[in-house]
Amino acid sequence: MPESAEHRSREHDRDREVSYSRPMRTPMPGLIHEIGDLETLETLLEAGASLQGSRLQGLDLTQVEDDLLARDDLTGLVVLGGVLTPALDRHLRTGGAVIFPADPAAPVRPYRGTLYTAAELYDGLAEHGYEQTTDARAYAWLQDSTIRHDAYVTVLRAIHDDAMTDALVDAVSERRVVGVMGGHALARGTVPFAEAAHLGFVLAEAGYVVATGGGPGAMEAANLGAWCREEAQLAPALASLGTVPHFADGIGPWAQAAMDVVMQAHGTLPAPRPLRSLGIPTWHYGHEPPNAFGDLIAKFFSNALREDLLLHHSTEGLVVLPGAAGTVQEVFQMATRQYYEVDGRVPPVVLVGREHWTDHLPVFPLLRALAEGRTMAERVHLVDTVDEAAAVLLG
């Protein structure tokens, strides 16, 4: 069913509610500009700048309808989804604009110009249960065999992921990002979980954005630590989460325990506040829910794209906590980037857990052999503790 005006208003309020002080991109003459937030469009309209060549992504244009109805420089303007009145739709098309309609059946906005928040992905969790949340409905949309390979739906998912990619670039622009990898099986209430949270806090306090795969386990722990603005927040948060140790105990209770921690802190955090914690999960692993402790969440339908972007944006290095197949895959994806010095950079990789990475899974010896004689030889480290890992990155 089409979105109601009330729903759109709530969604817009959530998008505006969390501000991370990223620089506003001011369109330059003669270029194609992707505009994904209303503030940038309002600035452009107030300045009388040309709209030609602009791409408006997922915006509620009814809020600037009078300004747009007064414009005739519409050739080359492309409107990707969003909200328009019939009168504005006619005016834009008559003026030479191209309009791609939204799909009211889609559980997500394919043309959105912003990353997600946990509140958006888990909208309705407490009232209706996990299965009715945006996150669960998007996973069901991906798994629906009747439309899984439908060309139109495939295009919408690809457009969504492209919009996520752009929004992610905006979010991390000019920020120092450290990736933290680790297994999804790490349970809340354990010492390793608390240690991973401590690592996230230390890195965020040092000025880094802590990026993870956005899921449960070690990823949640690192995001939690980075999300905490004061060290005193960590202990009570860990205690609360420990009451529901793992998402296998039920995604709804697992997610609700985290959302309770977030909501208890709501209103005590400064706004706008700096971006410290970033989750980059995927609906490909939809059985693994996203953790709630990313200040922003870039969720993708394509796992391959998501993994590449997570490593690409970990510009200041990668900390790898014990994990299994998925973590090993990410280690060697980063090793490939180090080996070929992709983008002219060789970010450090720090493996945590000597026994795990030499005896249980002999990843480190292979990395050392691969790195011999190359720049990456000095950028691959093996340590025993998260404090040692932080010390490597903090120099």
Image: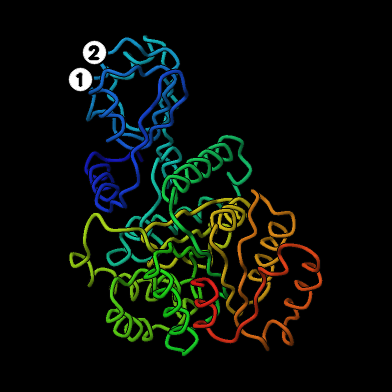
Q: Residue at x 45, y 59 (%)?
A: 136
Q: How many marks?
A: 2
Q: Secondary structure at mark 1?
A: helix
| Mark seen at residue 66 | 1
Task: Count residues near mark 1 (Cα–Cα under 10 Å), then give few for <14, some for 14-19, many for 20+.
Answer: few
Q: Position of residue 59 (x, y in %)?
A: 33, 34
Q: CA distance from mark 1 to mark 2?
A: 6 Å
Write down the quadrant of residue 240 in the picture. Answer: bottom left
Q: Residue 272 location, x and y as percent?
A: 24, 54
Q: Amino acid at mark 2?
A: Ala
Q: Which mark is residue 70?
A: 2
Please name the residue shown 61% across and 36% down the image: 151
Residue closer to the observer: 254 or 31: 31
Q: Quadrant of the N terminus?
A: top left
Location of residue 248 with respect to 139 vertically, above or below: below
Of 308 and 382, which appears nearest the observer?
382
Q: State left or right for residue 368 relative to residue 222.
A: right
Q: Residues within 10 Å of mark 2 (few under 14, many from 20)?
A: few
Looking at the picture, tell me which residue is in the foreground, 238 or 86: 238
Residues at discs 1 and 2 in contact (Cβ within 8 Å): yes
Indicate the amino acid at tag 1: Asp
* Badge 2 element: loop
Above or below for 108 versus 376: above
Q: Quadrant of residue 222?
A: bottom left
- 23 or 17, nearer to the observer: 23
Q: Is residue 393 above or below residue 166?
A: below
Left-right relation of 109 to 284: left
Across and down, in percent, residue 42 comes to 25, 29
Instruction: Tell me where residue 178 appears, x and y as whole percent.
Output: 50, 64
Task: From the viewer's perspective, tell me whether residue 46 is left or right of residue 249.
Answer: left
